[in-house]
Amino acid sequence: MKKCYIAEIEERNGEYEYRTKYLFKTSEDPDKYNDNVAKTWRGDDDNEYDEDSNGYWSGGTLMCPGDVKKISPEHFKVLKKYLVTL
């Protein structure tokens, strides 16, 4: 059975940092799911991993997987009105 999660991707571009929250459902490891989203955040899947920053480089921007939190199906239903579901 798939569980519901809210997660975050952090983009670092020079002195600018952006955080984007999104929703997803999975029956597998939610941290691996979020890591894969960070890796492919800008449409590439061969981005270079940076061990020091725990993120993926794409065109001078570093995408880092952020927090993942399990949420109830009821919260998921409400939050999907405001956040993208991947």
Image (cartoon, helix red, strand yellow):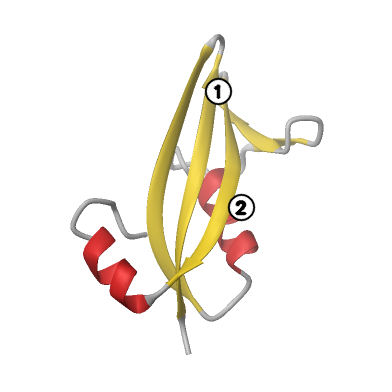
Report the quarter where the C terminus lies.
bottom left
Residue found at the very far right of the displayed protein: 52
Identify whether 34 is placed above or below 73.
above
Q: Position of residue 36 (x, y in %)?
A: 57, 54
User: Crowding near pointer 1: few (<14 within 10 Å), some, many (20+)?
Assistant: some
Specify the amino acid type for callout 2: Asp
Q: Residue furthest top?
A: 15
Q: Quadrant of residue 72?
A: bottom left
Element under label 2?
A: helix
Instruction: Judge from the rendering whether residue 53 lies leftward or rightward of residue 32; answer left or right.
Output: right
**Observer able to see residue 45:** no
Please provide percent x and percent y for residue 55.
66, 37
| Residue 12's disc number | 1
Could you say where residue 69 lies in the image, as x and y percent from the top left?
Answer: 53, 61
Q: Are marks 2 and 1 in contact (CB under 8 Å)?
A: no
Neighbour tally class for label 2: few under 14, some 14-19, many 20 plus, Cα within 10 Å: some
Does residue 7 appear left or right of residue 51 in this picture? left
Residue closer to the observer: 71 or 17: 71
**Distance of label 2 from label 1 (alpha carbons):** 15 Å
> Disc 1 on helix, strand or loop?
strand
Q: Residue furthest left?
A: 81
In the image: residue 9, left or right of residue 78: right
| Residue behind mark 2 | 35
For badge 1, the amino acid type reads Arg
Estimate the x, y position of residue 48 in percent, counting from the top left: 69, 35
Measuring 64% from the left and 36% from the top, which residue is drawn there?
56
Is residue 78 among what the camera can see? yes
